[in-house]
Amino acid sequence: KPNAPSLDSYWMPFTANRQFKAAPRMMASASGMHYTTTEGRRVLDGTAGLWCVNAGHGRRQIASAVERQLLDLDFAPSFQMGHPIAFEFAERLAEIAPGGADARLDRIFFTGSGSESVDTALKIAIAYQRSIGQGTRSRLIGRERGYHGVGFGGISVGGLVNNRRVFPQIPADHLRHTHDLSRNAYVKGQPEHGAELADDLERMVALHGAETIAACIVEPVAGSTGVLVPPKGYLERLRAICSKHGILLIFDEVITGFGRLGSSFATDHFGVTPDIITTAKGLTNGAIPMGAVFCSRMVHDALMHGPDGQIELFHGYTYSGHPAACAAGIATLDIYRDEGLLTRAAALEADWADAIHALKGLPNVIDIRTIGLIAGIELASRDGAIGKRAYDVFVDCFEKGLLIRVTGDIIALSPPLIIEPAQIGEIVSMLGDALQRAA
Ligand code: PMP
């Protein structure tokens, strides 16, 4: 096809004025479950934007709250002064923070994005260790095929080698990923086998010594790298190993936070409580960039009173707790609460899984994984070129009116949580047709 964007231009964002010049896919507006392109075509959003628009697009309540806030107070720093709305938002988040009564993660640091949340969490972990007299603990453990954004911290613990290829790295190691045992298994929910992969952390401890390791960070369900669902018992085992060796466990819930799995956080869903949680995306329904890091009082209090009586962690961004972002976040939490969206994925999960798994047997579909309102559909490569077939399916779907996401050979779906059952049917039907055409 003449002027089609090359795969390269699809994978890399480059600059805003270069991308897709040849064949732009321009979104002009969005409402509810749909985008409208600049050519006036409606496209069903199968990805909640970029895993973030959980309450659907164009929510007036959020827009109005932001406008009101900008007119009242557009900006004030969050250090040496504050503004009430940041405290209000933190309190609201604390109310839904996971963890039992004695380990609730209700201390909130605000950031501007998922990547900033990850950097913040990693810094908190190292500073916390120092504050309790464990100053040798600076090593970080991530996971192969983990994705934690594109800050230096995130690429270091992230499992995508290409993301850190030309950059110096913060000392980090990577656990073997959890996917091998569930491959080709077409699993709904959690795979039965593979919990012992968590023992890879013991191998790291033996290799480096527990006294060098500050924290281990994992996405409870890896999203951007292809919807990798942890085997039953895996997260519990990771938690136990971390506790045994004094390693902090960080859950990166930038995707799984705010209802994606049918509970406020994946932490609630799996019943495993980490020491720190990173969030962004659904925090403000994607309307205003913002992230938040949740940590336990134990971690927070130690940071505030280091060994020499000083605050241990000097850290904060210009836009930490930005008033407009807090206003968007509070309005978003109101919508989640009033419309029951944080549990909606649980109600839809069985129908979602049945509908998506009906794609099994279509040409080149080699695995399907679903949990909550996420799905990963893995395809056989075309002509040995990784991602080529999935990309063709992506373009085809978009032209027919469905937005999906592809990562390598894997199609990822994560629709807004307001999705109606009939729209699940539409997604499956449009995707099924595209898979047939890509045979
Ligand atoms: N962590 C996870 C688990 C993510 O999925 C993402 C983004 N997809 C990030 C961190 C980075 O977030 P951001 O792009 O907002 O920096």
Image (cartoon, rainbow, N blue to C red):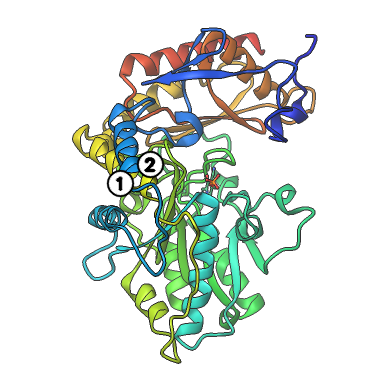
Answer whether residue 321 is visible to the viewer in this image. Answer: yes
Label 1 neighbour load within 10 Å: few <14, some 14-19, many 20+: many
Label 2: which secondary element? helix
First in sequence: mark 2 or mark 1?
Answer: 1
Q: Label 1 sits on what residue type?
A: Ser
Label 1: which secondary element? loop
Q: Position of residue 286 (x, y in %)?
A: 43, 37
Q: Is residue 129 left or right of residue 300?
A: right
Q: Which residue was labeled with disc 1?
A: 264
Q: Position of residue 426 (x, y in %)?
A: 42, 12
Of residues 208 and 200, which is closer to you in this image?
208
Answer whether residue 246 is visible to the viewer in this image. Answer: no
Question: Are discs 2 and 1 less than 8 Å apart at CB?
Answer: no
Q: Which residue was labeled with disc 2?
A: 284
Relative to 317, residue 4 above or below? above
Relative to 206, residue 400 above or below? above
Q: Position of residue 159 (x, y in %)?
A: 65, 53
Q: Residues under labels 2 and 1: Cα distance?
A: 14 Å
Of residues 181 and 379, which is closer to you in this image?
379
Q: Position of residue 367 (x, y in %)?
A: 56, 30
Which residue is pictured at 47% across the width and 54% down the height? 319
Relative to 126, residue 249 above or below? above
Of residues 317 and 157, which is closer to you in this image?
317
Which residue is pictured at 28% across the width and 65% down the height? 104
In which quadrant of the rendered image does the C terminus lie?
A: top right
Relative to 170, residue 2 above or below? above
